[in-house]
Image (tube, grey):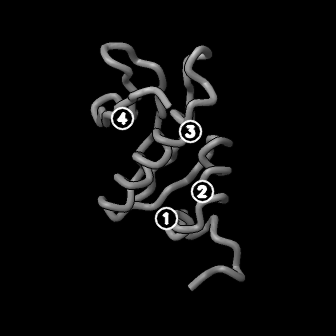
Amino acid sequence: MTNVAVVHHPAESRFIAMSGEDEVGRLDYTLNGGTVDLHHTEVDTAMRHQGIAGRLAEEALREIRAQKLHVRPSCPFVRAYIDRNEEHQSLLEPSLVPEDEGP
């Protein structure tokens, strides 16, 4: 994988993937009360299939956990990422947790 750093820009409501000085991806979100809606993930075409979208999702979810917030993954990529990584399912907004998986 390319050497990529993920940086949080809260004033812009996004996480940005940087390769050197170049922005190569981003994950946009909206904060509403105690829930973060992760609604759009985008990676430059030339940089796809290198794990960048996963790195963006992982960093966003790590930050959401640290801030003790919930997540609404309206971005299909992020929803699939959470489905594949059970350790993040506890972050789901309570209304999104299937009844058989609730506390």
Q: Is 18 rendered above or below residue 96?
A: above
Which callout, 1 or 3, points at the residue further toward the start of the chain? 3
Measure the C-alpha gap from mark 3 to mark 2: 13 Å
Element on which disc 3 rests: strand
How far across and down, in percent of the image, does residue 26 sit?
Answer: 47, 28
Disc number placed over residue 39 in the picture, else none: 3
Most extreme residue toward the front is 1
Q: Nearer the viewer, mark 4 or mark 1?
A: 4
Element on which disc 1 rests: helix
Q: Residues within 10 Å of mark 4 (few under 14, many from 20)?
A: many
Q: Are circles 2 and 1 on residues that touch, CB within 8 Å?
A: yes
Disc number placed over residue 91 in the picture, else none: 1
How far across and down, in percent of the image, does residue 40 sit?
Answer: 56, 33
Amino acid beneath label 2: Ile
Which callout, 2 or 1, points at the residue further toward the start of the chain? 2
Amino acid beneath label 1: Leu
Q: Is 35 rendered above or below residue 44?
A: below
Amino acid beneath label 4: Val
Measure the C-alpha gap from mark 2 to mark 1: 9 Å
Q: Residues within 10 Å of mark 1 (few under 14, many from 20)?
A: many
